[in-house]
Image (tube, rainbow, N blue to C red):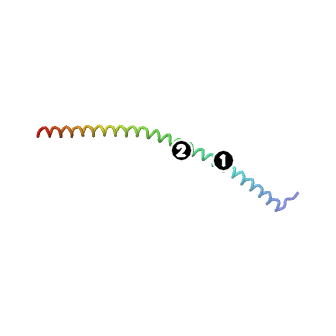
Amino acid sequence: MQLSLNDILSLLSVIAVLMLIVLIYHMIFVSVSLRRIADRMDDLSKEIEGLILKPIGAIEYLIDWFAGAVEGMRAGKEVDEKKAHKHKN
Protein backbone atom coordinates (compact mmCIF):
# COMPACT_ATOMS: atom_id res chain seq x y z
CA MET A 1 0.00 0.00 0.00
CA GLN A 2 1.44 3.26 -1.10
CA LEU A 3 0.54 6.50 0.65
CA SER A 4 -0.14 9.51 -1.47
CA LEU A 5 0.73 13.07 -0.59
CA ASN A 6 -2.94 13.86 0.16
CA ASP A 7 -3.11 10.91 2.61
CA ILE A 8 0.00 12.12 4.45
CA LEU A 9 -1.32 15.70 4.60
CA SER A 10 -4.70 14.47 5.87
CA LEU A 11 -3.00 12.37 8.56
CA LEU A 12 -0.81 15.33 9.59
CA SER A 13 -3.88 17.59 9.70
CA VAL A 14 -5.72 15.15 11.97
CA ILE A 15 -2.66 14.83 14.23
CA ALA A 16 -2.33 18.65 14.36
CA VAL A 17 -6.01 19.04 15.31
CA LEU A 18 -5.66 16.39 18.02
CA MET A 19 -2.55 18.08 19.39
CA LEU A 20 -4.39 21.41 19.39
CA ILE A 21 -7.28 19.85 21.35
CA VAL A 22 -4.84 18.38 23.88
CA LEU A 23 -3.08 21.76 24.14
CA ILE A 24 -6.35 23.58 24.81
CA TYR A 25 -7.31 20.92 27.37
CA HIS A 26 -4.04 21.41 29.21
CA MET A 27 -4.30 25.20 29.04
CA ILE A 28 -7.72 25.00 30.71
CA PHE A 29 -6.36 22.90 33.57
CA VAL A 30 -3.29 25.09 33.93
CA SER A 31 -5.45 28.22 34.11
CA VAL A 32 -7.67 26.62 36.78
CA SER A 33 -4.59 25.58 38.73
CA LEU A 34 -3.15 29.08 38.46
CA ARG A 35 -6.42 30.52 39.72
CA ARG A 36 -6.30 28.20 42.74
CA ILE A 37 -2.69 29.15 43.39
CA ALA A 38 -3.61 32.84 43.13
CA ASP A 39 -6.44 32.32 45.64
CA ARG A 40 -4.08 30.57 48.04
CA MET A 41 -1.53 33.37 47.68
CA ASP A 42 -4.28 35.92 48.34
CA ASP A 43 -5.32 34.07 51.51
CA LEU A 44 -1.70 33.79 52.60
CA SER A 45 -1.08 37.50 52.01
CA LYS A 46 -4.18 38.36 54.05
CA GLU A 47 -2.93 36.22 56.92
CA ILE A 48 0.52 37.82 56.77
CA GLU A 49 -1.08 41.26 56.63
CA GLY A 50 -3.12 40.40 59.72
CA LEU A 51 -0.04 39.19 61.56
CA ILE A 52 1.81 42.39 60.73
CA LEU A 53 -1.06 44.80 61.39
CA LYS A 54 -2.10 43.40 64.79
CA PRO A 55 1.13 44.46 66.57
CA ILE A 56 1.16 47.75 64.68
CA GLY A 57 -2.44 48.40 65.79
CA ALA A 58 -1.54 47.60 69.38
CA ILE A 59 1.46 49.93 69.27
CA GLU A 60 -0.68 52.66 67.71
CA TYR A 61 -3.25 52.22 70.48
CA LEU A 62 -0.52 52.50 73.15
CA ILE A 63 0.97 55.59 71.53
CA ASP A 64 -2.48 57.25 71.36
CA TRP A 65 -3.13 56.31 74.98
CA PHE A 66 0.25 57.69 76.06
CA ALA A 67 -0.27 60.89 74.06
CA GLY A 68 -3.70 61.32 75.64
CA ALA A 69 -2.23 60.80 79.09
CA VAL A 70 0.51 63.35 78.46
CA GLU A 71 -2.02 65.84 77.07
CA GLY A 72 -4.20 65.28 80.15
CA MET A 73 -1.26 65.87 82.48
CA ARG A 74 -0.28 68.95 80.52
CA ALA A 75 -3.84 70.34 80.60
CA GLY A 76 -3.95 69.66 84.35
CA LYS A 77 -0.73 71.62 84.90
CA GLU A 78 -2.03 74.54 82.85
CA VAL A 79 -5.25 74.62 84.92
CA ASP A 80 -3.19 74.47 88.14
CA GLU A 81 -0.93 77.29 86.93
CA LYS A 82 -3.96 79.46 86.07
CA LYS A 83 -5.49 78.80 89.52
CA ALA A 84 -2.17 79.60 91.20
CA HIS A 85 -1.85 82.79 89.15
CA LYS A 86 -5.40 83.90 90.10
CA HIS A 87 -4.73 83.30 93.82
CA LYS A 88 -1.58 85.40 93.68
CA ASN A 89 -3.49 88.39 92.31
Q: Residues within 10 Å of mark 2 (few under 14, many from 20)?
A: few
Choose the circle earlier in sequence order: 1 or 2. 1
Residue type, label 2:
Asp
Q: Residue at x 11, y 38 (%)?
A: 88
For the point 15% across and 38% down, the residue is 84
Could you tell me which quadrant the C terminus lies in? Answer: top left
Question: Where residue 37 sits: x, y (%)?
Answer: 58, 44
| Residue 53 vs residue 77, the one in the foreground | 77
**Extreme residue in the left direction:** 89
Q: Secondary structure at mark 2?
A: helix
> In this rendering, would 21 be left or right of 8?
left
Distance Cα–Cα, label 1 vs label 2: 20 Å
Residue displayed at 27% across by 40% down: 71
**Residue 85's spot in the image, x, y percent?**
14, 40
**Residue nearest the viewer, comparing 86 with 43:** 86
Q: Which mark is residue 42?
A: 2
- SS type, badge 1: helix
Q: Residue furthest right?
A: 1
Please give the name of the residue rendered at 66% of the width and 49% of the height, measured from the top-left corner.
28
In the image: residue 17, left or right of residue 43: right
**Badge 1 vs badge 2, beta-carbon distance below 8 Å:** no
Give x and y (percent) for residue 77.
Answer: 21, 38
**Quadrant in which residue 68 is drawn:** top left
Mark carried by residue 29: 1
Quadrant housing the N terminus: bottom right
Q: Considering depth in this image, is 16 or 46 the residue closer to the camera?
A: 46
Disc ID at residue 85: none
* Few, some or many residues within 10 Å of mark 1 (<14, 14–19, 20+): few
Query: Which is nearer the eye, 87 or 77?
Result: 87
Does 2 sit above or below residue 52? below
